[in-house]
Amino acid sequence: MLGRRTRLKKAAVLLTPLLMAATLSPADDDKYVCTPAKAIECDADLNCGPPAPQVAPPTFFHVDLDDGVITLLGPAERRGETTQIRYMERDGERLIMGGAEAGRAWSLIMPEGGGSMTLTANFGDAGWVIFGQCIAEDELSP
């Protein structure tokens, strides 16, 4: 069976969070690569379906807990976009983080070391829930 560090994390991100860590002490392995897999958008009337993004949704993103930044890796036209992690804490074996930008609030929850991830985004009149996978950056090389 694969170890915790080698399991993929579910990642959910149609936003690109990059913010300062508030209550999290940095560790050497606090860098992850994530990819969104499934997303749903719901409005206040509970009309739900696939998101209708106004820009190309992220295909891969990098989470750097040491620097408190999330950076888009793909698609190519959005590579390098960042957002700050303004709130971060460890809750048992989970990492919980959040932030706000451009009138939107977001939160990201994932287990330490990699695994399933859930990202939520609130736009006031609608919200997204995104599921995906993350892996610790140091597990990427063979």
Image (cartoon, helix red, strand yellow):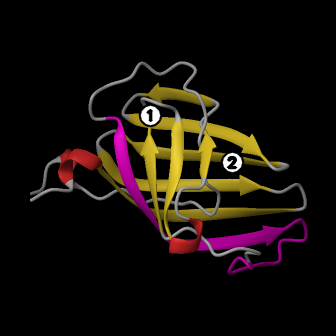
Q: Magenta stretch containing residue 126, yes or no?
A: no
Look at the numbered disc 2 and give the secondary structure of its residue. Answer: strand
| Residue at image coords 65%, 55% | 120
Q: Magenta stretch containing residue 38, yes or no?
A: yes
Estimate the x, y position of residue 118 in percent, counting from the top left.
53, 55
State the image quarter where residue 13 is shown: bottom right
Please, what is the dominant secondary structure of the magenta stretch?
A: strand
- The residue at which mark 1 appears reads as 65
Estimate the x, y position of residue 112 in percent, counting from the top left.
34, 38
Estimate the x, y position of residue 100 in percent, counting from the top left.
74, 42
Quarter of the C terminus within the rendering:
bottom left
Amino acid carrying mark 1 in the image: Leu
- The residue at which mark 2 appears reads as 106
The relative height of residue 30 versus residue 59 in the rendered view (above or below) is above
Look at the numbered disc 1 and give the secondary structure of its residue. Answer: loop
Q: Which is nearer the N-term, disc 1 or disc 2?
A: 1
Q: Which region of the structure is painted magenta? A: 30-52
Amino acid carrying mark 2 in the image: Trp
| Residue at image coords 29%, 42% | 113
The relative height of residue 59 versus residue 127 in the rendered view (above or below) is below
Q: Nearer the viewer, mark 1 or mark 2?
A: 1
Q: Residues within 10 Å of mark 1 (few under 14, many from 20)?
A: many
Looking at the image, residue 98 sits to the left or right of residue 141; the answer is right
Q: Residues within 10 Å of mark 2 (few under 14, many from 20)?
A: many
| Residue at image coords 24%, 56% | 7
Please state which of residues 111 and 68 is positioned toward the viewer in this rendering. 68
The relative height of residue 111 versus residue 33 in the rendered view (above or below) is above
Q: Is residue 21 visible?
A: yes
| Residue at image coords 53%, 39% | 69
